[in-house]
Amino acid sequence: MLKGWNNAPKASLTIRMLIGAYLLYIDYQIFGDVMAREGASKIVMITFMVFFAIVGVFLIIMSLKALTGAGSDKSDEKRSDPADPEKNQRQKNQSGMESDDDFLSK
């Protein structure tokens, strides 16, 4: 999943879902006009319809996943445990992160 989606506030995710729904609504409104057009303008309108549909569906799906916690990177194994500093250091080493002490000792 994209970084930052799970950390976004619920209000932000809800607004993103509404924007996605609005883009799909615009697609629905444009569809009637597309059938009446001819030539290059029809191709341009179809291109924007496809683009709006892709972006709208993407925003809705990613926001729903983040709101429901599906695909969350926050598993029990990755959470920090303040009582076990050795486990935290092992997790940092596995993820490629260095502690401040390691960085300063170099």
Image (cartoon, rainbow, N blue to C red):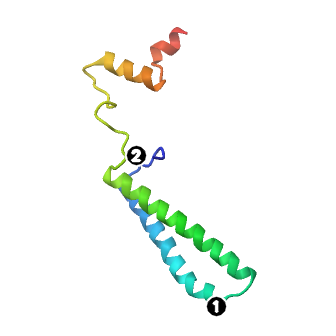
Which residue is denoted by mark 1 in the rendering? 36
Element under label 1? helix
What kind of residue is marked 1?
Ala
Residue plotted at (45% across, 70% down): 21
Which residue is denoted by mark 2 in the rendering? 7
Residue closest to the far top: 105
Residue plotted at (57% across, 82% down): 30
For discs 1 and 2, the disc positioned in front in the rendered view: 1
Q: Against 30, is 12 above or below? A: above
Q: Earlier in the sequence, mark 1 or mark 2?
A: 2
What kind of residue is marked 2?
Asn
Residue closest to the far bottom: 36
User: In the shown orientation, is residue 93 left or right of residue 54?
Assistant: left
How many marks the image carries: the answer is: 2
Q: Residues within 10 Å of mark 2 (few under 14, many from 20)?
A: few
Q: Quadrant of residue 67?
A: bottom left
Q: Is residue 75 visible?
A: yes
Q: Residues within 10 Å of mark 1 (few under 14, many from 20)?
A: few
Residue 11 percent location from the top left of the image: 37, 58
- Which of these two is toward me, 11 or 17? 17
